[in-house]
Amino acid sequence: MAKWRIIGVLALLVVGAGWYITKPAPLPSDALDGLTGDPARGEIVFAAAGCASCHTSEDGPPTLLSGGKTFASDFGTFVAPNISSDPEHGVGAWSDLALASAIMRGVGENGAHLYPAFPYTSYNKAELSDIVDLIAHLRTLPPSDQPNAAHDLAFPFNQRIALGPWKFLFANSDWVLQEAASPELIRGRYLVEALGHCAECHTPRNALGGLDTARWMGGAPHPSDEGRIPNITTAVLSWSERDIAEYLKSGFTPDFDSAGGEMAEVVKNTGQLTDDDRAAIAAYLKAIPPVAE
Amino acid sequence: MSKKLNRVVATAVAFCIAGAAFAAGHLTEDQQRAMDARQSHMGLYSFNLGPIGAMAQDRIPYDAAIATAAASNLAALASMDQAAYWVEGTDASIEGSRAKAEIWTDAAGYMAEKEKLAAATAALAAVAGDGLDAMKAAFGPVGQSCGSCHEAYRAPRT
């Protein structure tokens, strides 16, 4: 009997330790001390981070972050929440710290894990000052009283506690391109890996939904099962840096085809960046290792 | 220029060959002809966007006559009646087609996009000869029109 009691206690300890290691970890309470958000600078961060692409409604104006767009995946259908300034249905009543914890740590205002359909696994590499500017900008955007809809996920993916171990395995703030030799590459890496979260679509995932960084930007099936998201490494993409930068500005390919689907949404964002920032993104894409098809 | 022309011709030929090979088993002649025609139409947009885009991107010197000719072609193309293109059974579920089913199910929305392009290209044609800055300013809405229609009505590559 004593033996079983010891095994039971040990099992509880393991479960308890597992829970403790993987419990939601918001930013520390003093993380934003000394930072003041600049809404004008935040507008650029808002574009670079692509917030509007997911959080606006299908037909709504580009500044009304009412949520409601749906995203099919292997795990079920996610619904983007209302992140407008509405205090009841949006995030208007959240503190700056709560919003920053959601964006960079994937922890909701209620302290629960958020699903990584929200790319906090990229935003965790953002500069805190940029996030504070972004939040200041969000607060200037109009409110929407559209209620949030629940995600439609199958068991066990509907158990948020499982996201703790998921984050433990797959969420880290290391750069994939470890060596960035010039200021332009450092900026490009920041725009692609942190704010732009390009890899979320352009990099394939493993069975648990973690990004396969060995095939970084190597293309992936479209999560809706419709078509493929292209490989944008130099193994396939032969465009010059200038071609890439022009595409991110106007949506036109070198042959004057034009971006469609989700990438048309992305170009609306990258079109708001500076020429230097688009050139930095292009330089980054030329610097990452080619991934053979 | 000639390289771009070659590429467009090669693409058009490839479409025809691929289309013909496929049609043998699966599509009626009317369906195949409609798909060929509308894809050729897109090729003509691309071909005429070439010189204007290259000028707008400062890759070649501005030339008022060339810009006006290409912009007038774009405006003519965008004003053409396309009703006969959209034969039933030729949406993106057919190999070789990237036309989303929404073109049929949301025909009014699609027509609104087409009208937007017609207006943007007409505005471009009106000013394309008035200097590089005027051409660039009018070219922006044309690109946005391409993007918003492709966003809603063109399926991704498979």
Image (cartoon, helix red, strand yellow):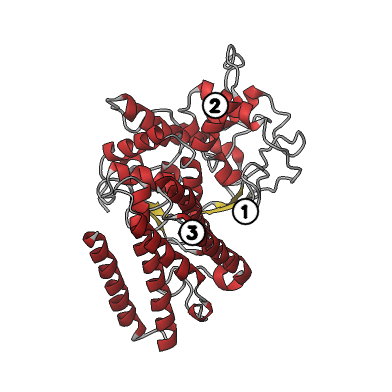
x, y (%) of residue A30?
A: 60, 13
Instruction: Characterize the local packing of mark 1: few (<14), some (14-19) or many (20 or more) Cα atoms within 10 angstroms.
Output: some
**1 and 3 marks on the same chain:** no
Pointer 1 with pointer 2, Cβ within 8 A: no
Q: Quick one: A18 or A187, which is closer to the camera?
A: A187
A158 or A217, nearer to the observer: A217
Q: Which chain carries label 2?
A: A
Report which quarter residue B27 is drawn in. bottom left
B154, B5: nearer the viewer: B5
Residue situated furthest top in the rendering: A34
Could you tell me the amino acid type at mark 1?
Glu
**Front-lying residue, A84 or A110:** A84
At horizontal 46% and vertical 38% (from top left) the residue drawn is: A196
Picture coordinates of residue A238 (x, y %)?
Answer: 26, 50
Q: Residue shown at 44%/32% (left/top)?
A: A194
Between the C-alphas of marks 1 and 2, the distance is 26 Å
Above or below, A12 against A116 in this view is above
Q: In x, y percent, where is residue A29? A: 62, 16
Q: Name the residue under label 1.
A: A58
Disc 1 element: loop
Q: Residue B126 carries which label?
A: 3
- Residue under label 2: A41
| Residue type for callout 3 | Ala
Looking at the figure, which quarter contains the C terminus of chain A?
bottom left
Q: Which of marks 2 and 3 is in front?
A: 3
Q: How crowded is mark 3: few (under 14 residues within 10 Å), some or many (20 or more)?
A: some
